[in-house]
Amino acid sequence: MTTICSYTIEQYMKMIEDFHGSSAPGLLIGGFMVDLALKNKPECEFYDCICETATCLPDAIQLLTPCTFGNGWLKVINAGRFALTVFDKYNGNGVRVNLSASKLENFPEIKNWFLKLKKKQEQDKDLLFREIIAAGASILDIKEVKVSPDFIGKKKGSKISLCSQCGEAYPVRERDNGKCLICDGLNLYL
């Protein structure tokens, strides 16, 4: 029986739907990626994750590990690559797992989805999920890595100040002019 981090496929699919809002191929593949990374990570008590895309994969990491964006153990670097790294939070030794385009020849619906060769509405979703389950970790690459010191450890919080324009608290920046980012011109709202 195929499992992802000790969950059956059915259990994991239910977790995806509850957390993500719908079944998603990226989360299913992401589950296999997290499972492979955790099975191959260095022996360590505490680990962090880096995710190289902001789409789907961060949700798989948050579902299957204690690493979340909120606790700072998950760092999302939106490089647009479907890859993740699990590493020892103190020394940076870890493993990087990615979906390998070169391994998709026997899985045409995954290839169509991953390389966007077909529009979403033209894809056969049932076939796509069947192919992902059949492929499992066989479509993934894994390698040992050493994470840059820039991503090891938790950054200390900066000093807090009150914005001279709106009066709200904000973290002081290196080149600070006494205003929060919004009052300094970041347009979030019309």
Image (tube, grey):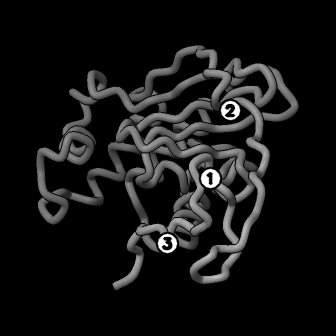
N-terminal of the two: label 2 or label 1? 2
Mark 3 highlights which residue?
182
N-terminal of the two: label 2 or label 3? 2
Give neighbour class at mark 2: few <14, some 14-19, many 20+ (Cα, 10 Å): many
Q: Is residue 19 above or below residue 53?
A: below
For this view, does 40 lie left or right of residue 138? right
Along the line of sight, the residue nearer the viewer: 178 or 7: 178
Mark 2 highlights which residue?
38
Residue at 35%, 52% (x, y): give it: 129
Q: In this view, does 181 lie above or below 123?
A: below
Task: Compute the Cα span from label 1 to label 3.
Answer: 13 Å
Secondary structure under the numbered disc 1 in the rendered image = loop
Mark 1 highlights which residue?
173
N-terminal of the two: label 1 or label 3? 1
**Amino acid type, callout 3:** Ile
Give neighbour class at mark 3: few <14, some 14-19, many 20+ (Cα, 10 Å): some
Residue at 56%, 51% (x, y): give it: 60
Task: Compute the Cα span from label 2 to label 1.
Answer: 36 Å
Q: Position of residue 139 (x, y in %)?
A: 39, 29
Along the line of sight, the residue nearer the viewer: 20 or 135: 20
Q: Position of residue 174 (x, y in %)?
A: 61, 46
Residue at 24%, 47% (x, y): give it: 113
Residue at 54%, 56% (x, y): give it: 59
